[in-house]
Each structure stands twice: as C-alpha cells, then as structure tokens.
Image: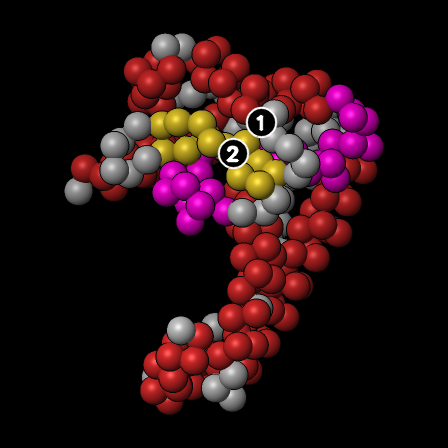
Amino acid sequence: MFKKWMKMLSAVRPSLQACSRTIASVRGKHALPDLGYDYNALEPVITAEIMQLHHQKHHATYVNNLNVAEEKTAEALAKGNVKEAIALQGALKFNGGGHINHSIFWTNLAKDGGEPSKELLDAINRDFGSLKNMQDALSNATVAVQGSGWGWLGYCPKSGRISVATCANQDPLEPTTGLVPLFGIDVWEHAYYLQYKNVRPDYVKAIWKIANWKNISSRYLFEANAGKQ
C-alpha cells in the first residue's frame, strides 16, 4: 500500500514543486505579535515576570520554530522529498498551534475586560443556562486537562451554538474540533507555575478576573454574523 501511495505522489510531484515555489515567493515569515499592553498590566492575576517569559521566550520559540519548519517543508517539496515534508508535519502542527493559540490568548486578556455583550450573554444563557454555569463548565474542563494543554470556549459554525472543549499540548482548536476559538485558557505550566505553583485551579479561577469580554464578544459577533450570510 505504501509503495502504491508513493507512486501516486510521484505522479503529482511536479505540481508539488511548482506549488512550493509559489508559496515560498509570497509567504512572509511569522512574527511575534505585540501584546498591546505592558507586561505588568495584568497584575496581580498574572505577574510581569510570567508575562515576559511567556511572551518573549515561549511564544517567540514557537514562532521561530514554525518559520524553520515551514522553510524546511518548502525545501523538501521543492526537491520532491515527500517523506521529509510529511515528517515535518508534527513540527508544523505543534509550533503553528503554539503561535495561533498564544496570539489569541494575549487578546483574550485585559485588566478591565468589561462584561459580555448582550448578544454573547444571550448565547451563553441559551447554551449553558447562565454565565456562571459556562464559567464553571470551562473551568472544570480546563483544570482537568491532563499534562499540558488548553481549555476553550468555542463557536460551532454549523449549529450556531457555543460550547466548551479542551485540546492537548498546542493542538489548535478549530482544526481539532471544528469550533472557532472565542476564549482560551493556557494550562501549560509556564503560564502559571512561577506564581500559582502546582495549584492549577487557583490560576484558572483567577483568570476570569482579566477576561477581555470586549474581545471575546467581538469574536462571537463576527462568527455569528458570518453564519447569517
């Protein structure tokens, strides 16, 4: 079966090579996004030390490794080396997911995040019964993540409803579950251990104090309106 599959890939190799050249010519490198606020802006919920390390070291590493993985993939496809390109998919998923997840995470947080918009609150009440029920559901699911991962509030384009989901490691929400991310909670230890030690529930409980409801509401409205078109 593998030989048959490789024979089929060989037949399309010229197209893959042309595609990789086109991608390389138009794709720019990924860059570490600005936070939009100071590292100490979320204190006392998250310390400046954690924010700086999380952003400048951890997120930056995902960005750098993603760029390297994309370059190696383009080179492999240009050479027609499909095996190598396939072998790089794990690095693309892990580092690409890390970049996507953190880019959302920073915008999901704010010192004075306000309250959910009427539209979002109506959807939360419809799907969870109350805001507290939703917060409890997401908190419980996130605390229960084994090892490293993320807890998410997501929007389902097919049903128009919102729900809770978790993803392991840096797996991105939408490709993994079909849900569009609205609000994410990072429960990799680098996100909280220096401050909360091994008490993950305290960190998850505290993060609601800095939830940027303006951003979360905007994400919901964008997706809900897109579904009406």
Q: Residue at x 74, y 32 (%)?
A: 192
Residue 84 position in % (x across, y down): 56, 77
Which residue corresponds to mark 2?
A: 166
Q: Residue 26's quadrant in the figure?
A: bottom left
Which range of residues does the magenta coloring cover? 172-199
Q: Is residue 175 left or right of residue 81?
A: left
Q: Secondary structure at mark 2?
A: strand
Q: Residue 45's quadrant in the figure?
A: top right
The residue lying toward the viewer, choosing from 45 and 134, is 134
- Quarter holding the C terminus is top left
Q: Residue at x 59, y 50 (%)?
A: 98
Which residue corresponds to mark 1?
A: 142
- Give the amino acid type for the residue marked by disc 1 in the picture: Thr
Q: Residue at x 53, y 64 (%)?
A: 89
Q: Are marks 1 and 2 in contact (CB under 8 Å)?
A: yes
Q: Which label's residue is closer to the chain start, 1 or 2?
A: 1
- Give the amino acid type for the residue marked by disc 2 in the picture: Thr
Q: Is residue 210 among what the camera can see?
A: no
Judge the density around disc 2: few (<14), some (14-19), many (≥20) Cα neighbours within 10 Å.
Answer: many
Q: Residue at x 71, y 50 (%)?
A: 58
